[in-house]
Amino acid sequence: MFEFLGRLFSRRRDTRVDDLFKDRYTNFKAILDANSELLRLLSSMDRMLEGRTLFGMAYVRSQGARALFYAARMVRSYERLSGRAQPRLHETLEALHLKIGEVLGEVGHRPPVPDLVLPHVRVGRTMIDSVGGKNANLGEMAGAVGLTVPRGFALTTAAYQLFLDHNQLGPEIDKAQRAVDPEAPETLMEASQIIQTLFLQGEMPPALEKAMHDCLAEVFGQDETLRLAMRSSAIGEDGELSFAGQYKSILGLVPARLVESYKLVLASLFSPRAIAYRLANGILSEETAMAVVCLEMVDPLASGVAYSRDPLAPGRPEMVINAVWGLGTYAVDGRVDPDKYRVSRTNPQDVLSSEAAPKEVMLVMRPGGGVEERPVPEKDRGAPCLNEEQIGHLARSIVRLEEHFGAPQDVEWALDRSGRLLFLQCRPLQVSGAAFVPPDLPQVEAPVLLEGAEVACPGVGSGPVYRVLTEDDLAGFPRGAVLVAEHSSPTYSLVMTRAAAVVTEHGSVTGHMASLAREYQLPALLGAKGAMRVLENGREVTVDAWLGRVLEGSVEPLLALRTDDTGTLMKGTPVYEALRALGALVLPLNLTDPKSPDFRAGNCRTVHDVMRFVHERCYESMFAISDLASSQGEVARKLNARLPLDLHVIDLGGGLEADSASRIAAVHQVVSAPFAALLRGMLDERLRPCEPRPVDMSGFLSVMTRQMFSTERERFGEKSYAIITDKYLNFSSRVGYHYGVLDAYCGKTVNSNYINFQFKGGAADDVRRNRRVRAIGLMLEGIGFRVEVEADMVKARFAKYPGEEIASRLEDLGRLLIYTRQMDMLMTDETSVERLARGFLEGDFSHDWMPSVGGRWSAD
């Protein structure tokens, strides 16, 4: 909002005070913004340390860096605000920087070998750090296992690093990723767009382009009909984590587009879903690199995926094979429901079950390059893609791969038109670790909305339905919702840490999304026919991913079956211990009492200490500057209104009707949208602001005792400030022994609109002050705010609503500020908390229901 500051000072002024105020208010606001970011960071770390949410070292390192960044910003802004250097705070931050560095360690990937390009005949799985998992496994399958693999070569991680260095992309990537908030999918999309554009506009290093074309000629010779597939082979991909469907593949590529396609695959390392996947699985971008597979393109009759074991029942002696006509992309992306075959592991010739699905369309190679969708010939639509001999051949090869790699395998295969079986990829299969045995499910009476769906990942989830039609819909995905879509897609990994469950009408348990759901331990149903018709947006449902059904409402007996396996898994892991060590340097608060002589900069030992110290002291400095501005400068104007506070208005541009001759502002002159709304609430006739309020004797004496013996600098009747523009308001209120800060923007752009409110302090004892903020918290929750209450402080936020909704909430806040004025004296017992909140929410502002004890006293 600080572009508005320039408007205030656009005309010549000779007043040094005004310039001082402008500069220091900017720093005051910077402190509040950084403090808010740190509060969110501390809350997030506390939640992660419960161990119930998956996170990795990317999260730990990000939190450590952000904590230091925002703490340092607070200190620098406080120095400028107060006009005093803070060497002790800088010493504390430097010591914390060193300790946090020891916890986080050094990161980064550097290629182990210098080769830019390697033919697959020279590649094996020991070279995984140079060529990535997909390349390494292709070379291993062709060489050590002896299976048929298309000709091809690997573009190594050294090539990726050369591209980065040649275009100096490292700093720009870091800058874009610093703006990513894991809780806000839209920030992932924004950062992704910036970074991918950098890759696509980057120049190809001449040495890399020459090496690529030399290897192309070595492996394939001169073949004008050659078509290629270019696929990702990032570090970490196809290993312990699958990265299923996270990166780009380009099919049917003509050699002339090799360079352009290479840059597209590199850029996909920073697709929104890839960034989200790394954040969720603890992988820093600095720790990965993109190698690329370049394979001869197969024009298959049929393709698909094979699992050497059933991922939901790995103990069973059977494997799972899925198949579609044409290219296998439609099988793994959930575009077409595939044929399903179950085959004996002990006797791969024994097909235990065969189910041919109706297949209306297929993906095939286009003669001029690329791929296209075509209808499946009528005679083949319901026919099986594989015969028993082909199934047996494929099954035997799958068993060989599992034996060679020593773990269950997830394999992509293709059958060309000559009947030759080719292997395109293999990677470790993510399995549940135990047989798929549903728990003893309770009998429930909830209506069944859908049933007969296929379970991709077992479990139970409940929440409001959120239907996804396009990738853009993911930006607004709310935490705890049930994702409902027509087709499964690996793109949904963007919100899998936020979703309660996933339900799609089409998809396969061998597809990318199913693999991701199992990695995220997210209940998922596929093949839920009619889901998009039956499950309306916002409808509360329970997904039973044991029996493949969706039930009406929140079914508590089923939800009781949910487990905290993720918490058990996280605690004790190296990444959890790293977060715990970081938390010890960030979270503890030692400076708890601002009145204590020990509340000083030299006693700060953690990031939280620095944050609390600066936040407490910044108000003293800001109010001193504001007082100077209103008494000596030309900025502040006293508001003439029937309000129980000395309110001064500082117009930064467009907030008041022009009237430069007067130092007094009338209410009718206020044209600032948020401030006008706040005043409407504060001046509500029902509040009777000028009438005395009844209080009980003990409450009054509690306040008077605090007033007489307090060493605080706050006093009844100090000035309060409203700093405004046409759409912006920062309202700092000091009444008695409390302060409130309200920061709001109210305009036509929904995503820019917000209200941040903070209230602290009071004139009574700690018990009454805590009751007061809890009552205020209940009131704020009742009018739609997100609320956090701690000790004698309440914080609340209402954001991203239309201007009229923001204005309505500001009116409510105006009423709340007057209604709760000096409310400490009314907080006689615990029942008063709920009664005060109920009175406010019901529009009864009289307090007449409050009992009087020993007489009635005026609070004014």
Image: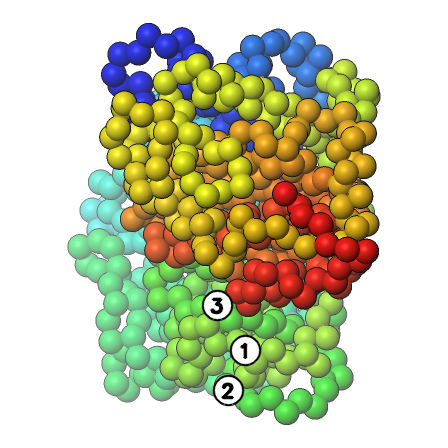
Position of residue 156 relative to residue 310, above or below, is: above
741 and 859: which one is in front? 859
Q: Is residue 853 left or right of residue 859?
A: right
**What's the distance in space between the residues labelled 1 and 3, CA to CA?**
11 Å
Residue 471 lies in what quarter of the image? bottom left
654 and 279: which one is in front? 654
Mark 2: few/some/many CA within 10 Å (<14, 14-19, 20+): some
**What's the distance in space between the residues labelled 1 and 2, CA to CA?**
9 Å
Cβ atoms at labels 1 and 2 below 8 Å apart: yes
Does residue 618 appear in this view? yes
Q: Amino acid at mark 2?
A: Leu
Q: Provide the residue designation for mark 3.
A: 483
Q: Provide the residue designation for mark 2.
A: 449
The residue that appears at 30% across and 79% down in the rendered structure is 360
Cβ atoms at labels 2 and 3 below 8 Å apart: no
Where residue 473 appears, as percent x and y from the top left, is 38, 60
Q: Is residue 558 left or right of residue 801?
A: right
**What's the distance in space between the residues labelled 2 and 3, CA to CA?**
15 Å
Position of residue 119 relative to residue 3, above or below, is: below
The residue that appears at 26% across and 12% down in the rendered structure is 12
Say how many tags the image has: 3
Q: Provide the residue designation for mark 1.
A: 541
Quadrant into which the C terminus falls: top right
Quadrant into which the N terminus falls: top left
Q: Nearer the viewer, mark 1 or mark 3?
A: 1
Q: Amino acid at mark 1?
A: Val
First reached walking from the N terminus: tag 2 or tag 3: 2
The residue that appears at 32% across and 83% down in the rendered structure is 381
